[in-house]
Structures are given as structure tokens and as C-alpha cells.
Image (tube, rainbow, N blue to C red):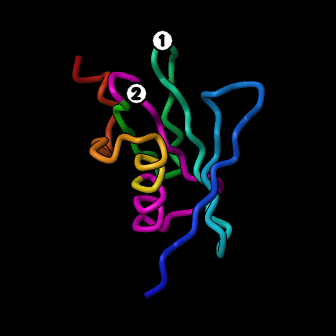
Amino acid sequence: MQDEIFFLLKNPDDDCHDVIRMRDSNLRIKILCLNGSKYSEPTDKLVFYGNNKGEVLAFESADNQNNFYKILDAIRWYSQYIENPTMEILSHDPREDL
């Protein structure tokens, strides 16, 4: 099994709207910062959440991508990229628990 290679496409205008891309597929995952903003979870996409040291992030699959395991691998890669490898990945918005 080969290691997957991911890239982070940074939005130069907004740090809270980056995209994770996978090199050998069309996998794209939008990263959204949710603190202080309303968010309606789309029904046609896989969405996961993470808590980056108090900052709640949403990870949305782009288009109709539903490869659960590759999406989780990409989020794990991103957690290492932001130097938070223990970031918890959740299936629900943790702000709802407050």
C-alpha cells in the first residue's frame, strides 16, 4: 500500500476557507472555521468536525465524494500539518453540545 499524498490549497484572501487535495484522485475537502459563524450542514456531502485547540473546524467533501476512509486520512494529514496530531475528528458539530 502506498502512502497517499495530500496538498493544502491556501485561500490568499481567507485563512478559514482552505482546501485539501489528494494527488492521485479528485478528492477535495473544504476546511471551514466555524467559531463565531452560523453553519448549515449540507445534506449532499460528508461533513466531519475537528477541534483545533478551541477552534472548531468543519471538513466538507466537495461535490459528491463519499470515500469515507480517504476523507478521514486527509483530515488526519491536515491535523499533522497544523501540528495538532491528537485533534479529535467528530461526526457532529461539537458546538451543539454546549
Query: Which of the 4 quarters of the picture holds residue 84?
Result: top left
The vertical placement of 13 against 60, above or below, is: above
Image quadrant where one finds the C terminus: top left
Residue 55 within the magenta-colored segment of the rendering: yes
Relative side of 84 to 20, left or right: left
Name the residue rendered at 27%, 45% in the picture: 86
The vertical placement of 3 against 34, above or below, is: below
The vertical placement of 26 against 9, above or below, is: below
Query: Which of the 4 quarters of the picture holds residue 24?
Result: bottom right
Relative side of 2 to 21, left or right: left
- For numbered disc 1, what is the local secondary structure? loop
- For numbered disc 2, what is the local secondary structure? strand
Mark 1: few/some/many CA within 10 Å (<14, 14-19, 20+):
few
Name the residue rendered at 60%, 28% in the picture: 16
Residue 79 within the magenta-colored segment of the rendering: no
Given the image, on which type of amino acid does mark 2 rest?
A: Val
Residue 94 lies, in percent from the top left, at 29, 29
Residues in magenta? Answer: 53-75
Return the mark for residue 56.
2
Image quadrant where one finds the N terminus: bottom left
Given the image, on which type of amino acid does mark 1 rest?
A: Gly
Return the mark for residue 77.
none
- Find the distance from the CA under tag 1 to the CA under tag 2: 10 Å
- Please tell me which residue lies in front, 15 or 28: 15
